[in-house]
Amino acid sequence: QVQLVESGGGLAQAGGSLSVSCAASGRTFSNYVMGWFRQAPGKEREFVAAIVGTGSRTTYADSVKGRFTISRDNAKNTAYLQMISLKPEDTAVYYCAARDGALMGWDPKMYAYWGQGTQVTVSS
């Protein structure tokens, strides 16, 4: 079992930047692939980025590639999502998620553990 708590986010103007963090507690953090997902009102939850336990590999949705960076600090049991060049369509609740193993997944069903979410709003 692992517990996840997001923080950060908030309001930014288009072209600006924000970051969100995900603090984990429970079992060994480095054993988990960490993912970031987002959900806008009226839309399904969508994949944003994922990182393997060692931090050596990452993957991104095409919509955020080159603008968002996922990272992790296993010593601090924390995953991060840094967002630059924000667009109004990035507005959503951002969730971090964790899954056992080494396979990064794009499907939310692959992740067993979820945080409560944090709001990111980008104004035009």
Image (cartoon, rainbow, N blue to C red):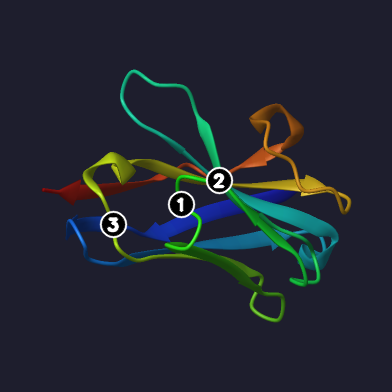
- Labelled pair 1, 2 in contact (Cβ < 8 Å): yes
Q: Which residue is mark 3?
A: 86
- Labelled pair 3, 1 in contact (Cβ < 8 Å): no
Label 3, label 1: how far apart the Cα atoms are: 9 Å
Give the structural element (helix, strand or loop) at label 2.
loop
Give the structural element (helix, strand or loop) at label 1.
loop
Label 2, label 3: how far apart the Cα atoms are: 15 Å
Q: Amino acid at mark 1?
A: Val
Identify whether 65 is placed above or below 16. Answer: above
Q: Amino acid at mark 3?
A: Leu
Give left or right: position of 77 versus 100. Answer: left
Identify whether 18 is placed above or below 116. Answer: below
From the viewer's side, name the closer residue of 99 and 91: 91
Count every numbered label the image shows and give the total: 3
Give left or right: position of 39 versus 123. Answer: right
Q: Which residue is mark 1?
A: 64
Instruction: Measuring from the top left, give residue 75's x and y in whole percent.
Output: 70, 81
Crowding near pointer 3: few (<14 within 10 Å), some, many (20+)? many
Give the structural element (helix, strand or loop) at label 3.
loop
Residue at point 21%, 62% (across, down): 15
Instruction: Measuring from the top left, give residue 47's x and y in whole percent.
Output: 56, 39
Identify whether 72 is placed above or below 64. Answer: below
Q: Which residue is mark 2?
A: 61
Label 1, label 2: how far apart the Cα atoms are: 6 Å
Q: Amino acid at mark 2?
A: Ala
Indicate which disc, 2 or 3, sits on the residue closer to the N terminus: 2
